[in-house]
Image: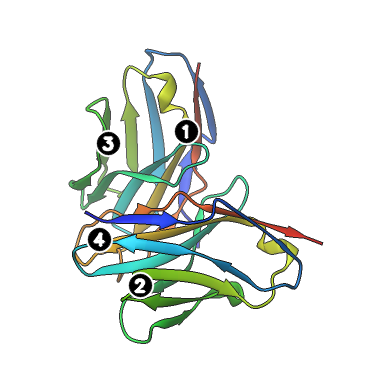
């Protein structure tokens, strides 16, 4: 079985500061990894995904994440945040298979202070 | 192109009642998945349908059921509602199953409140 742990439930940062949202996963099989963003009263939007290849993945809105197999981590980073980045961020994992569910973490609320 | 649409947006039901939630996938998408997101938690997988057949089921009681129609739209039914069923119900569509290769696009959700 797979599981995802997001180590911080809330992360407050000042505008234009860098941010890192931490994610660790557990799985006995190979997996794909994702980060989703959920703005207030909206559904989920895919930020980026790791399928294979380069361990540094670039996504939308200036976000990037690095896959670290030895530490089973997939941390999300942005060098300079904006007020518009205020949202809930979810790390997620799924197995390599044709019809797999996505397992989500509990989420990290990113709040940006002016 | 229109995204994933869900109806209704909000719904209030009483314990013991039954509810039906609806989802229309993006045009050309044949796979639909349903998720339950309780306040303060991440979404939890309920069902996945592809070509009108159930392809996956999460750890939910038999009170939860779903189906997919020939036009690939889907309905989620919940019987004998409990207070704990209060949540945001998300629908996601993709061209095919295979959650890595085929991106899932999420709808805005239906907010269900059970009183």
User: Where residue A95 sits in the image (x, y, percent)?
Assistant: 23, 63
- On the same chain, marks 2 and 3? The answer is no
Asked which secondary structure carries label 2, the reply is loop
The residue tagged with tag 3: helix, strand or loop?
A: strand
State the residue at coordinates (60%, 45%).
A41
Identify which residue is drawn at 52% across, 37% down.
Answer: B39
Q: Residue furthest right?
A: A114
Outermost bottom residue: A54
Residue A111 or B78: which is nearer the viewer?
A111
Which of A40/A108 is in front? Answer: A108
- Front: mark 4 or 2: 2
- CA gap, disc 4 to disc 1? 25 Å
> Label 4: which residue?
B97
Q: Chain of mark 3?
A: B
Which numbered circle lies on residue A71?
2
- Residue drawn at x 44%, y 47% is B42
Residue B26 visible within the image: no
Kindly check if marks 4 and 3 are in contact, taking CB atoms under 8 A apart as contact. Answer: no
| Tag 4 subunit | B
């Amino acid at each position: 079985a797979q599981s995802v742990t997001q180590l911080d439930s809330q992360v407050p940062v000042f505008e234009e500061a860098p941010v890192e949202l931490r994610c660790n996963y557990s799985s006995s099989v190979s997996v794909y990894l994702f980060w989703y963003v959920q703005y207030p009263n909206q559904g989920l939007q895919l930020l980026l995904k790791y399928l294979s290849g380069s361990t540094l993945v670039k996504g939308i809105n200036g976000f990037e994440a690095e896959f670290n197999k030895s530490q089973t981590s997939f941390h999300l980073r942005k060098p300079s945040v904006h007020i518009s980045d205020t949202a809930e961020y979810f790390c997620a994992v799924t197995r390599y298979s044709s019809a797999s569910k996505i397992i989500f973490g509990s989420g990290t609320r990113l709040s940006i202070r002016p | 192109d229109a995204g994933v649409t869900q109806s209704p947006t909000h719904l209030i039901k009483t314990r013991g009642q039954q509810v039906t939630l609806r989802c229309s996938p993006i045009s050309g998408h044949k796979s639909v998945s349903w998720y339950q997101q309780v306040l303060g938690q991440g979404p939890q997988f309920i069902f996945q349908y592809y070509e009108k057949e159930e392809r996956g089921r999460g750890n939910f009681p038999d009170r939860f059921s779903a189906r997919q129609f020939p036009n690939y739209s889907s309905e989620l039914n919940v019987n004998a509602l409990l207070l704990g069923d209060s949540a945001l119900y998300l629908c996601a569509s993709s061209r095919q199953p295979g959650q890595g290769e085929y991106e899932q696009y999420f709808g805005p959700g239906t907010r269900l409140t059970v009183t």
